[in-house]
Each structure stands twice: as structure tokens, then as C-alpha cells.
Image: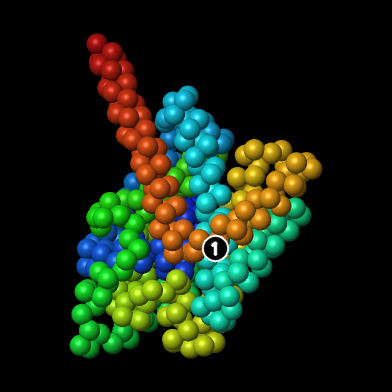
């Protein structure tokens, strides 16, 4: 059971980032569709476990030690190269979204100009990339489970205490202009797709290296169910409080502040830590994809990447989430198509072997 919970924690921890915790992802991918969005979160309770389980099994079969072996196996030599490159650039996009998110947080919580948040986060990320502050990241990672316990408690409290008297919350929810796609089901699929695309390497490597293989499979399923439930709970909280949240960059932070200024401040600090913890690995992986780590070129590139991320942050947190995450979701669809083809070929090969053995 201990190994199962550990693997579930890896799956959840990899996907749950600052964008998820802020509530902006949920708002665009689910809440804006009204009641249909709630059904969309229930769809994810099915998709996350299935895809996580499949990646663990595939990783075991391929003995995967990196994401490249998985991507190239699923997509082939040429398409695999393109997908590998696209994933690297989308990781850069995730880093930019985090920088933009810090600006939104400083503006919403402290009344400062977004540029202040962009600058602070960009400088912190550059310093982290130059000094390889892995210990600091490890410490921040420890708070992530506690952060989401707090988010879930806030979401449940906000759902139970929401005052919807005389308010058509479904109509208000549908006034949300920034939607991930024209359709609630496609939106749910895109949300799962871009999140799982980022975890392809990690879950496959878990399947290849985890000694307790059965626990790895159970952990992937359990983690997937937890991810779906988290999306459902946060979505319900925002749906029943949508009249206060439309147009807000960080809905969960606003909910926390409305409950108590002290809780709001604590949530702001936690979100900043999670933004940093998401931005550094994303921009580090992107930079390391093109430059050898611990070289002068890498250090120069790290500074340039940080400056570019700062500049692109001015596009805005909400607009970046609305653009980059759905696009990454479509890239994920290509990977999923490769999964389906690979599964079909594997089953057909096993069927032929069974026939040969029978004869």
C-alpha cells in the first residue's frame, strides 16, 4: 500500500501545478461550460487512471529510461522528433505561464503592477537555473501535498457555504469568455491530454524502474482518480461562486481571501512557491534540451530564457493559459493516437502468437 500511495503521489504531484491550484485552468476548461463542465470533470476521473496505467505498462515493456524512447516508439522516427521538439517548446510555454501567473498574483493580492511579479519571478528562476538550487526545489516540493489539502478544504468550504439565492449561476458561468474549446467534452479531453503529455516520461520511467510493478500500476490508477476528484471539487467550488469569480485571474486565491485575509495571504505565499517550483524545472528542461548543463553557453542561455519569459509574461496569465495549454493538448492527442495504434498492434501480435501456440 505504501508503494501504491507513493506512485499515486508522483502522478498527482507531476500534474498538479500552480495553474491548476490557482483555479484558472479549471475555470477555462470546465467551469465556463456550466453544468456540462461538471460532467467534464467526471470524464477525467476515467481518463486519468486509464492513461496513467497505460504509460506505466508501456514503460515496463520498453524499459524506458527517458521520454525520447517512449515518444519515438509511439510516434515513429520523424514525427517523434517533431513531437519531442514541440514538447520542449511547450515546457518553455509552461514556464512563461508561471512567470505571468506571478504577476497576476501580485496584482490581485497586493495591488502591485503585474510587471513587479514578472520581474521577481524571472530573477528567481534565472538564479535557480544558474546555481542549480535543487535542495530549495526539494523543500518547496514538500509543501505541495499540504497546499492541495488546503485547496481542497477551501473548495469544499466554498461549495457548502455558497450563497446562490436569486442568482442564475449556470448563466453566469457561461458568460466566461476565455474557454479552452467550443465544446465541453473536447475541453475535458484537452485538459487531460496536455497534463498527461507532460507526464509521459515520468510515468513511463516509473513503469520501467519501479521494483513493485503491481504497486506502480495501482498507483497510476489511484493517482488518476485523485486528479479527477481534485478537478471536480475545485470546479464545484468555482461554479457555485462564479458570480464573484468571473474575470479573476486566480479564482482560488480570491476564494481564500474572501474566507479570511490571513488564509488569503497564506494561499498567496503557497501559490508563489508552487509557481516557482513549476517554472524552474520547465525552463531548466527546455534550456538543457539545447545546451549542455554547467557550461558557459548554458548559463548565458538561462539568462536569455529568463529575460524572454519575463517579456512574454506581459501577454497575461489568462491569455497564455487559454492559448498554450489547449495547443499542448492537441499535441497530446498525437501521442494518444500513437498509444492507440501501439495498443492495437500489441494485441494483434499477442493474438497471432496465441494462434501459433495453439497450433
Q: Which quarter of the figure is the C terminus placed in?
A: top left
Describe residue 223's horizontal placement relative to residue 18 as left or right: left
Please say if 68 is above or below 282.
above
Q: Give x and y (percent) for residue 146.
A: 53, 71
Tell me how many marks there are.
1
Q: Give x and y (percent) for residue 83.
A: 47, 36
Q: Residues within 10 Å of mark 1 (few under 14, many from 20)?
A: some
Task: Determine the secondary structure under disc 1.
Answer: helix
Q: Give x and y (percent) for residue 189.
A: 31, 50
The residue lying at 54 percent from left, 87 percent from top is 262
Please say if 239 is above or below 185.
below
Residue position marked by numbered label 1 in the rendering: 314
The residue lying at 48 percent from left, 88 percent from top is 260
Quadrant for residue 352, please give it.
top left
The colouring scheme, among rainbow, by chain, secondary structure or one colour, is: rainbow
Q: Is residue 305 visible?
A: yes
Q: Nearer the viewer, residue 210 or 290?
A: 290
The residue lying at 46 percent from left, 72 percent from top is 250
Q: Nearer the viewer, residue 39 or 249?
A: 249
Amino acid at each position: 500500500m505504501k508503494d501504491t500511495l507513493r506512485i499515486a503521489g508522483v502522478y498527482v504531484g507531476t500534474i498538479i501545478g500552480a495553474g491548476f491550484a490557482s483555479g484558472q485552468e479549471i475555470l477555462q476548461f470546465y467551469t465556463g461550460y456550466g453544468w456540462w463542465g461538471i460532467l467534464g470533470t467526471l470524464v477525467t476521473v476515467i481518463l486519468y487512471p486509464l492513461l496513467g496505467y497505460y504509460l506505466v505498462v508501456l514503460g515496463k515493456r520498453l524499459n524506458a529510461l527517458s521520454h525520447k524512447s517512449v515518444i519515438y516508439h509511439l510516434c515513429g522516427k520523424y514525427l517523434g522528433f517533431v513531437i519531442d521538439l514541440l514538447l520542449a517548446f511547450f515546457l518553455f510555454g509552461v514556464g512563461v505561464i508561471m512567470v505571468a501567473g506571478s504577476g497576476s498574483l501580485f496584482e490581485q493580492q497586493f495591488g502591485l503592477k503585474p510587471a513587479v511579479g514578472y520581474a521577481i519571478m524571472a530573477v528567481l528562476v534565472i538564479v535557480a537555473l544558474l546555481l542549480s538550487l535543487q535542495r530549495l526545489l526539494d523543500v518547496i516540493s514538500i509543501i505541495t501535498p499540504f497546499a492541495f489539502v488546503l485547496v481542497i478544504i477551501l473548495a469544499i468550504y466554498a461549495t457548502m457555504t455558497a450563497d446562490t439565492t436569486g442568482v442564475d449561476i449556470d448563466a453566469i458561468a457561461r458568460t466566461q469568455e476565455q474557454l479552452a474549446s467550443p465544446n465541453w467534452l473536447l475541453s475535458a479531453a484537452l485538459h487531460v491530454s496536455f497534463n498527461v503529455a507532460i507526464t509521459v516520461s515520468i510515468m513511463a520511467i516509473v513503469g520501467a524502474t519501479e521494483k513493485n510493478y503491481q504497486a506502480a500500476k495501482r498507483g497510476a490508477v489511484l493517482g488518476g482518480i485523485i486528479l479527477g476528484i481534485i478537478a471536480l471539487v475545485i470546479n464545484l467550488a468555482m461554479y457555485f461562486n462564479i458570480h464573484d469569480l468571473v474575470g479573476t485571474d486566480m479564482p482560488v486565491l480570491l476564494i481564500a481571501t474572501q474566507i479570511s485575509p490571513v488564509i488569503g495571504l497564506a494561499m498567496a505565499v503557497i501559490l508563489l512557491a508552487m509557481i516557482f517550483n513549476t517554472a524552474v524545472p520547465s525552463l531548466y528542461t527546455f534550456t538543457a534540451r539545447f545546451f549542455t548543463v554547467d557550461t558557459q553557453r548554458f548559463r548565458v542561455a538561462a539568462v536569455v530564457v529568463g529575460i524572454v519569459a519575463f517579456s512574454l509574461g506581459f501577454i497575461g496569465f489568462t491569455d497564455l493559459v487559454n492559448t498554450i495549454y489547449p495547443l499542448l493538448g492537441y499535441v497530446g492527442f498525437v501521442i494518444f493516437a500513437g498509444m492507440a495504434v501501439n495498443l492495437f498492434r500489441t494485441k494483434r501480435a499477442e493474438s497471432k502468437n496465441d494462434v501459433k501456440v495453439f497450433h
